[in-house]
Image: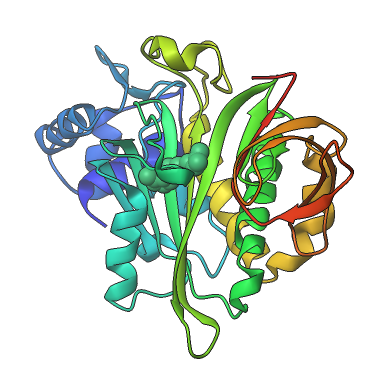
Amino acid sequence: MSLKEQVLRILTERRGEAVSGQWLADQFHVSRAAVWKVIRALKEDGHFIQAGQNRGYTLLPNSDVLSVTAIAPLLLPPLRSELLTIVSQCSCTNDLARQLAIQSAPAGSSVLADTQTNGRGRQRRSFYSPPGGLYLSMLLRPSLSMQESTFLTIAAAVAVCRAVKKICNIPLEIKWVNDLFLNGKKVGGILTEAVTDLEGDTFEYAIVGIGLNIFFREAIPDELASIVTSLYDIEPDGAIRCQLTAAILNELYQLEQNPCSSLKEYRALNFVPGRKIQIISGIRTGTAKALSITDQGQLLVEYPDHTQITLNGGEIQIMDIV
Ligand code: BTN
């Protein structure tokens, strides 16, 4: 571990407390000037560190830079620091995860980014990915049949809801199939992409990408303002983003070991059954009533002429929300 990482680890463990520069220098057998240099480098990386005259260095409560130092100690085995790739900006974390897959990276390898320049959603939509959000992709090598692929998304949605409840005590809801909602607005989404072996009806690998709006540091575009929200209206203290990231990775990896088992919880968190919906894309567009989520994770709907069909994917809108 480099001196920079060691100093950050100590400051993180004693977040909010002043840690003396001399003490840090003695601890790592380096000069005070060397400590000062790494503090400057950490500040350049975006960590909020207060330096008080003769009082030492304090990592402030709202300092929340994604770092292996902050996240790795919170991971549950087999997840570990070597499986994390953290970048400040990238085009799309799913694409970076795909590169890892091609290089034979193990399941659980994850890419985290502060921002994405070309974030993607389902249906070829773009996913707005400004600073202050959480954008991550995990590589999985599931032993599922292709018909069961929806369960990867289902397990991921449940993983995010569990993690957000645990860390933020905020109850999210799910809009079939991959949208995360808070107070009637979209707060996040999931994009699952896979490479399959058609002959074997199995996955070579899958990538589960999760985007979650934690706090918007800047005003969001007008066209999104009425349909999108964030977990917090003001910047939260307590390194929420790092804690949430670790909790989501832990829940995600564990649930993805047996994704079909998430269905009961997914149904309970889903607010679509019973609602009047507009089917925007899919085999038959138009208005319908959402009846239930089937054992395969499809949405069973009934049209005004009483025809019932199951939707595998496609896009729906809740009539009384959007
Ligand atoms: C959707 O709303 O349709 C899905 C959004 C998925 C966004 C996440 S953010 C991390 C990963 N990278 C992407 O470009 N998309 C997913």
Q: Residue furthest bottom?
A: 199
Q: Residue at x 24, y 43 (%)?
A: 90
* Residue 255 sits in quarter: bottom right
User: Which quadrant of the frame does ligand 1 lie within?
Assistant: top left
Q: Residue at x 48, y 20 (%)?
A: 215
Expressed as whole percent of the image width and height from the top left, the position of residue 286 reads: 68, 35
Expressed as whole percent of the image width and height from the top left, the position of residue 313 reads: 62, 52
Q: Visible in this render: residue 144?
A: yes
In the image: residue 156, left or right of residue 277: left
Q: How is the image coloured?
A: rainbow
* Residue 171 sits in quarter: top right
Please name whichever residue, 288 or 249, is drawn nearer the observer in this view of the structure.
288
Please name whichever residue, 122 or 151, is drawn nearer the observer in this view of the structure.
122
- How many marks are shown on the rendered structure? 0
In the image: residue 226, left or right of residue 317: left
Expressed as whole percent of the image width and height from the top left, the position of residue 282 reads: 60, 48
Expressed as whole percent of the image width and height from the top left, the position of residue 229 reads: 55, 19
Instruction: For the C terminus, give its image quadrant.
Output: top right
Q: Visible in this render: residue 70?
A: no
Please name whichever residue, 290 or 72, is drawn nearer the observer in this view of the structure.
290
* Residue 42 sits in quarter: top left
Tell me if residue 306 comes above or below residue 260 in the rendering: above
In the image: residue 193, left or right of residue 48: right
